[in-house]
Image (cartoon, rainbow, N blue to C red):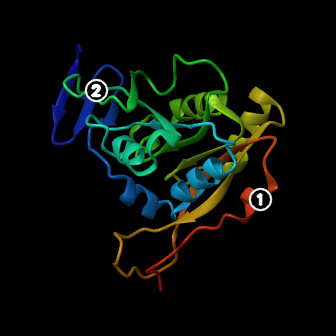
Amino acid sequence: MEKTVTWGLCLQRDDKGEFFTLANRHFDKIDHYLGYLPSRFIEFFLENAGGRSVDILDLGAGVNLVSAKEICKKYGRKVRVTTIDFVVNKAIRPASVDRLQADAAHISLRDNVFEFIYAFQLLSYIQEDKQLEVIREMVRVLKSGGVALLDDSLPFETINHQLFESFGPVAYCIPREGNKSEPGQVVFGGPSITTMIIKEPVDQRMYGIRERIIGHI
């Protein structure tokens, strides 16, 4: 890639001034930070799949696909995991994961593909004027009745207005709570605020899936 420099676990594109994380993220840590909602939603979709596999997207997966591979190991053939990242490690070719090298704002997939999408430490590395493009793409590839989770706290009223203009009364985002700390650590203050995007029609039972917030005083 031209005009690109790397250091540590981050990569910067000089031509756009954007940063892309190369760090590999473990699923248990992502699950914890997002209030254990990822595992709970995956299990909900599996319980209601009627024997079909559940399609999951890890957006901003990291170069070694650690979290995606761990999901496949945990749930086996009952899930199909696709990863998208701007940078990939071509030496790694896991048979259980479909890997796509792409810009998160321009996903080369058809509409309505995934029941569940998660993005961890993604939007904070993308310029603000491009973040809404990424969210629109997440909604586009999310199936009706699907859920997407992000670890970012977003301006919900602004985004919901933009989603309404793009898709009509089909998708909207709401705040959810997550854990700021590593598992087992105590943190003073309230839990972190994360973002959940849901796409109609929603199974009303999903509203009963609550966060598991631990370690906060």
From mark 2 to mark 1, how far is it between C-alphas?
A: 37 Å
Residue 136: image location, x then y, percent = 63, 30
Tell me where residue 58 appears, x and y as whole percent: 45, 38
User: Residue beneath label 2, please?
Assistant: 88
- Compared with 18, 153 (above or below) is below
Q: Is residue 155 visible?
A: no
Give the residue drawn at x 48%, y 80%.
Answer: 189
Q: Which residue is mark 1?
A: 205
Position of residue 88 measured from the top left corner of the image (x, y, whole percent) = 28, 26
Label 2 element class: loop
Q: Residue at x 68, y 50 (%)?
A: 156
Which residue appears farthest toward the left when viewing the image? Answer: 7
- What label sits on residue 124 in the rendered view? none
Considering depth in this image, is 98 or 122 the residue closer to the camera? 98
Residue 145 lies left or right of residue 141; in this view the side is right
Residue 1, horizontal then vertical, whole percent: 24, 15
Q: Residue at x 27, y 34 (%)?
A: 63
Query: Mark 2 or 1, which is nearer the eye?
Result: 1
Task: Give the amino acid type for the residue marked by disc 1 in the picture.
Answer: Arg
Q: Residue furthest front?
A: 51
Residue sitting at x 67%, y 27%:
112
Q: How many other residues sit within 10 Å of disc 2, few (<14), some (14-19) or many (≥20)? A: some
Residue type at numbered disc 2: Val
Q: If you read the primary sequence from the N terminus, does the residue marked by circle 2 or circle 1 appear first?
A: 2
Q: Residue furthest bottom?
A: 217
